[in-house]
Image (cartoon, rainbow, N blue to C red):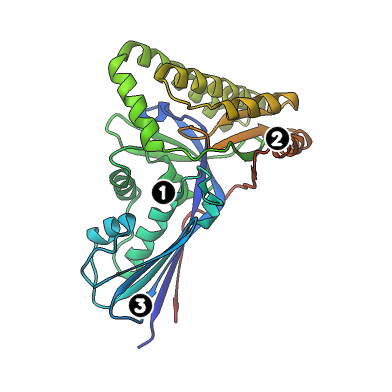
Amino acid sequence: MTARVVTARAPGKAVVLGEYAVLHGAPALVVAVDRRATVTIAPSGKPVNVVETRASEVRVFEASPGRETGVALVDLVVGERPRDREPWHATLDSTAFFQGARKLGLGSSAAVLTAFACAWAAWTQAPRPSREALIALHRRFQGGSGSGLDIAASLAGGAIVYRLDGADVPHVSSVQLPNGVGFAGVFAGRSASTPDLLARYYSWRAEKPEEAAARQRALRQISQLGCAAAERGESEDFLRAIDQYGRELDALGRAIGADIVTAEHRALAETARRFGVIYKVSGAGGGDLGLGLATDSEALAAFKTAAAEQGFPVVDLGLDRCGLIIEERAQ
């Protein structure tokens, strides 16, 4: 009998607007980026299931059919839809999301989970999981936290506006970045833990609900204005909103006692201003990915050169327009 091989590829993400505020119903603007997680599932060729993970290092795990592999993300997905009629070999490659041993902050776990869960559905000939089901799985993987915007970006590709309604149901619409707006990624030197930062945020919010509500209103208003500007194609208003949002994130970090915007990010923002480039932390913060944005491509290139000269690795990023891709072939 001909053996089947299933391959799934899912892009990472960069958050342009809406961090933290998206948790409370505000819109977020997210772009899928051309760094992809690749998952392949094929027959094992052994009497055991094999999982090979490729990230900052290569690791191999083996388990008897019906047993957990020890790879939490894999075991979470397989536990939902077990199938052990034949041993399988899964390769999970997320090397594009790392700079050496450090995560770049591009949503690697969401991209890997999206790719593996959808590849597993194809392998087991089951219906592909819905966006809502994937978001629920990813929250379980992260200990219950996360808005789901990274899953939505991995599935859809392109630029999206993502919003949770009052019932925590995600709503996604496609959007174009305003004409002429380009972006550059910079790694600010520290890999961050989104669950840890969210836990700090929720603790502060419980302790100081009035202050939290006021900051949430400010963040929501700016994100709404920026998303509306993107939908109208107004680049100046769009960039102004990104600049304002970055400053509000810095203030939020100081309020909760966490480095959402680190000293390295502040140094990069100062460098960006010298070239007329808007800079903000992307995502939950804490030291990994920052974005420079501008309509002047020469100014953006000069910023990238200056950042590299300061010792900050420039992360080559483009817009991924495809989203999740699944292929099946005979081996």
Residue named by callout 2: 310
Q: Amino acid at mark 2?
A: Gln
Residue at horizontal 33 percent and vertical 50 percent from the top: 134
Nearer the N terminus, badge 1 or badge 2? 1
- Check disc 1 and report the residue beneath it: 110
Q: Position of residue 2 (x, y in %)?
A: 38, 86
Instruction: Tell me the crowding category of disc 1: few under 14, some 14 to 19, or many 20 or more residues within 10 angstroms, Cα based.
Output: many
Mark 1 to mark 2 CA distance (whole Å): 31 Å
**Mark 2 vs mark 3: which is more N-terminal?**
3
Question: Which residue corresponds to mark 3?
Answer: 44
Q: Write down the quadrant of residue 123 in the picture.
A: bottom left
Q: Report the front residue among 38 and 31.
A: 38
Indicate which label's residue lies in the foreground, 3 or 1. 3
Residue 31 is at least partly visible in this image: yes
Residue at 70% x, 35% y: name it: 310
Task: Name the image quarter holding the N terminus.
Answer: bottom left
Against 55, residue 205 (above or below) is: above
Tell me whether the residue at label 3 lies in contact with that at label 1, contact meaning CB atoms closer than 8 angstroms.
no
Q: Amino acid at mark 1?
A: Ala
Please say if the residues under marks 2 and 3 sit with CB atoms less than 8 Å apart: no
- Left or right, 299 with reference to 220: right
Q: Position of residue 235 (x, y in %)?
A: 65, 29
Please rate how many residues cluster around mark 2, counting C-alpha atoms within 10 Å: few if below 14, some from 14 to 19, many from 20.
few
How many residues crowd mark 3 within 10 Å: few (<14), some (14–19), many (20+)? Answer: some
| Viewer-nearest of discs 2 and 3 | 2
- Measure the alpha-carbon separation of dots 2 and 3: 47 Å
Quarter of image, res 276: top right
Disc 3, SS:
loop
Residue 124's label in the rendered image is: none
